[in-house]
Image (cartoon, rainbow, N blue to C red):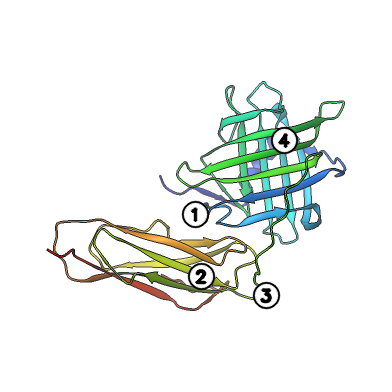
Amino acid sequence: MARQFRFGTAVTALFLSVLSTLPIGAQIAGNTALIVSGPSLEPITAGGNYYYLPSNGTFALYQLRDDGIRVVFQGANVQERWSLFFYPPVGVMLEVADYENCQRFPSETAGGVDIDGFGIGCDPHSGSFIVHELVRALDGVVEAFHISFQQICLGNYPPLGGEIFYNSSHMLPPAPHPAPTAKPGQLSVISVSVSPKQIVEAADAIFTFTAKPAPALPLTVGINEIDLSGRQVSFPVGGAIRFGAGVSSLTVPLHTQADTIAQKKTKYTVQIVRAPIYKIGQKSASVKIVDPPH
């Protein structure tokens, strides 16, 4: 399936114009936090771990039609924006319960969930969420909750997961110690290496990308693949890799397949594409691929 990531806010804005009300505006008196993490190949988190409190930005709660809720977090940096939708099945009130087999929009049999971060979402996706706590005002408007969630992009990426607390009476988990990251205006230096430098056909090699210092916000790095191997290979990235905030190292495997065609020693090279948002250290790395001994 082709990658179909959503960039920007046009889709979300159209969706909200139909379904949202004004922000509820409940005073934040209880525990409030957004916690999200995911593995390196997950497209939204890119391996980063994110922990936001009201001291890190603003939380806005929206009540939606069909008893859905939306939370928007906006950090100090314009890129630090998260949007989270949670819906019960159509015709059902949101309550303390497990909501499995969710898609982006709710149906009569399943709820809806949609997590966007840093201007990136994905469609289609699937997920689930658990409402651990839910408090309503006398008029039925949701004013406090604790929800944990999971989302899988396009059905073939590892999931992101997290929790959202809003005015909750539940205790927050301890905040992680943040990794040292680039200072404002400082560019990360991106390098690539490979190990081993020679493999026999049907073996794998590991390309390692490093960022020194780690980026303070998610960073997309362009790459070129130069395949002179003449073999069947698989490198599971599509022209770019993405470092999550605080992530200083990423590994990507090169898979090779056996064939019956005798070939000379050939190589597979990965190059970093120059861009103004980072510096380049070691620009390229190559692995030789040889036939098995006969």
User: For the residue labelled by badge 2, is the local secondary structure a helix, a strand or a loop?
Assistant: strand
Which residue does the image show at 49% across and 78% down from the upper left?
Answer: 281
**In this picture, residue 68 sits left or right of residue 160:** right
What's the residue type where badge 2 is placed?
A: Thr
Tell me the residue at 76%/38% (across/down): 62
State yes or no: discs 1 and 2 in contact (Cβ < 8 Å). no
Quick one: label 4, few (<14), some, or many (20+) residues within 10 Å?
many
Q: Nearer the viewer, residue 287 or 175?
A: 175
> What's the distance in space between the residues labelled 1 and 3, CA to CA?
26 Å
- The residue that mark 4 highlights is 69
Question: Secondary structure beneath disc 4?
Answer: strand
Give the vertical position of 270 relative to 26 (above or below): below
What number is the disc on residue 210? 2
Look at mark 3 in the image and give the residue it sits on. Answer: 185
Q: CA distance from mark 4 to mark 1?
A: 28 Å
Q: Position of residue 273 (x, y in %)?
A: 46, 71
Sequence-wise, the earlier of marks 1 and 2 is: 1
Pointer 2 or 3: first along the chain: 3
In the figure, residue 147 lies in which quadrant?
top right
The spot of residue 155 in percent (x, y) is: 47, 41
Q: Quadrant of residue 106?
A: top right
Q: Which residue is drawn at the image coordinates 15% and 65% (left, top)?
A: 293
Q: Nearer the viewer, mark 1 or mark 3?
A: 1
First in sequence: mark 2 vs mark 4: 4
Q: What residue type is disc 1 on?
A: Leu
